[in-house]
Amino acid sequence: MIQDGFIRIQWVLGIHVPSDDVWEAVKKGELNGLSFFGSVQKVPARARVIVTRKMVGQTEESMAGLLPAHSHDVTINFSENGRVMEGFTERAVVIHTGLPKRRP
């Protein structure tokens, strides 16, 4: 969370409620659901899109589970039209000890 209460890199939707009576009911919790409907009209347009061919970054730090907190470097390769071709992380470091050995 960030200071204003919104989670970064998430969608946010604002709704205007023109009726004071309805807005009071929302604030009191008497109305706690929302449905909306929309329509679309396609408009021809041209756009120039620049597609990256390679993205390099790091995963968020894992804080849960049996392993100590950790993250991984990650690489994703894209085709010329933006489709994911492959993605991989760096080689994992073995931190387990005392695991049974495989039989030949």
Image (cartoon, helix red, strand yellow):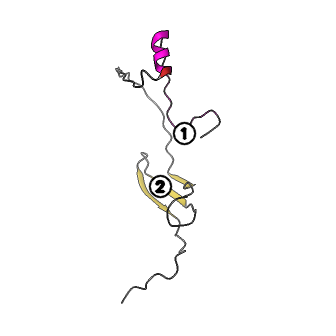
Q: Is residue 98 left or right of residue 1?
A: left
User: Is residue 54 visible to the viewer in this orientation of the structure?
Assistant: yes
Q: In which quarter of the image is the N terminus?
A: top right
**Tag 2 residue:** 77
Residue numbers of the magenta segment = 4-27
Along the line of sight, the residue nearer the viewer: 6 or 19: 19
Is 21 in the magenta?
yes
Along the line of sight, the residue nearer the viewer: 41 or 2: 2
**Tag 1 residue:** 9
Q: Quadrant of the C terminus?
A: bottom left
Under circle 2, the secondary element is strand
Which residue is painted at 48% across and 15% down in the image?
A: 23
Residue 46: image quadrant is top left
Which residue is painted at 35% across and 22% down in the image?
A: 42
Three-letter amino acid code at the position of disc 2 = Asn
Binning the other alpha carbons within 10 Å of mark 1 as few (below 14), some (14 to 19) or many (20 upward) gives few
